[in-house]
């Protein structure tokens, strides 16, 4: 759930791919490296803004893979740099393939660039899931374009961010089933991108 300062009067807005998104990720990544140091095993650009050519909300999704998502130093260091932990229960666990995985999600300081920081265990199925989504769509432009079209149409008819997410979820499950099949056929593994 966005904090009040993150809400826009226009609701969900899906725009064309922006060539500046990779550089925006690099800025956030550098800040996270300073904040977390060796607590971060890897910092990944994930979500739609990480997929060249993909239409998306102008919000950079970042995944930080850590050894222990419950390490209190993670939150202390991020809060010290102005990040805010999203308090909702669904920002503490997520279900992937019928199993729950722990996570934490942080928002940026008020008045800064829109970002979601997803903290996940390095060996978590949810960390793998985020990277598989990214790599599947990077490598399948037709699927990417159909997914972008679906998101645009959904945003036009369901502009409330919470409702948008709930409606998108079942379609996301279908997309991930196809991504898993692609991973099996191509030999894609999380280990290959570590």
Image: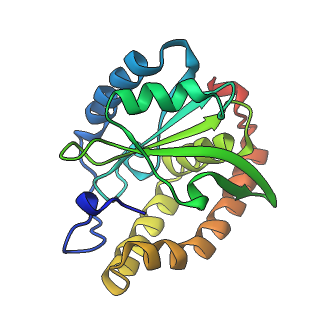
- Give residue 66's position: percent from left, percent from top: 62, 27
Please report the residue visible at 36 percent of the width from the left and 78 percent of the height from the top.
160
Please report the residue visible at 24 percent of the width from the left and 41 percent of the height from the top: 19
Q: Nearer the viewer, residue 99 or 23?
A: 99
**In front: 54, or 89?**
89
Which of the 4 image quadrants contains residue 99? bottom right
Outermost residue, top side: 38
Examine the rendering and report whether any part of residue 139 can be seen.
Answer: no
Horizontally, is 64 left or right of 190 in the view? left
Q: In the image shown, does 174 or 146 lie closer to the viewer?
A: 174
Taking the image as shown, residue 64 lies to the left or right of residue 184, namely left
Q: Quadrant of residue 73?
A: top right
Total marks drawn? Answer: 0
Residue 24, x across and y down, in percent:
27, 35
User: Residue at the spot x=48%, y=61% of the render?
Assistant: 142
The residue sitting at the right extreme is 98
Measured from the top left, where is residue 184 in percent x and y? 79, 46
* Quarter of the rendering occupied by the N terminus: bottom left
| Residue 143 at least partly seen | yes
- In the rendering, at what x and y percent does residue 166 appear? 53, 76
Q: Specify how the rendered protein is coloured.
A: rainbow
User: Which residue is at 63% across, 23% downward?
Assistant: 194
Depth check: give the residue in front, 177 or 96.
96
């Amino acid at each position: 759930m966005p904090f009040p300062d993150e809400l826009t009067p226009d609701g969900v807005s899906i725009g064309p791919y922006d060539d500046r998104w990779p550089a925006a990720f690099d800025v956030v990544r550098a800040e996270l490296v300073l904040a977390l140091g060796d607590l971060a095993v890897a910092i990944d650009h994930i979500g739609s803004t990480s997929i060249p050519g993909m239409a998306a909300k102008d919000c950079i999704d970042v995944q930080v893979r850590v050894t222990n998502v419950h390490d209190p130093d993670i939150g202390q260091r991020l809060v010290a740099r102005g990040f805010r932990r999203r308090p909702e229960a669904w920002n503490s666990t997520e279900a992937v393939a019928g199993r729950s995985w722990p996570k934490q999600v942080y928002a940026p300081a008020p008045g800064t660039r829109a970002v979601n920081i997803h903290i996940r265990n390095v060996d978590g199925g949810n960390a793998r899931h985020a990277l598989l989504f990214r790599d599947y769509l990077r490598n399948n432009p037709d699927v990417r374009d159909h997914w972008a079209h679906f998101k645009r149409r959904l945003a036009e008819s369901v502009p409330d961010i919470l409702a948008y997410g709930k409606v998108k979820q079942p379609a996301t499950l279908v997309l991930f089933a196809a991504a898993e099949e692609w991973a099996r056929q191509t030999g894609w593994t999380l280990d290959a991108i570590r």
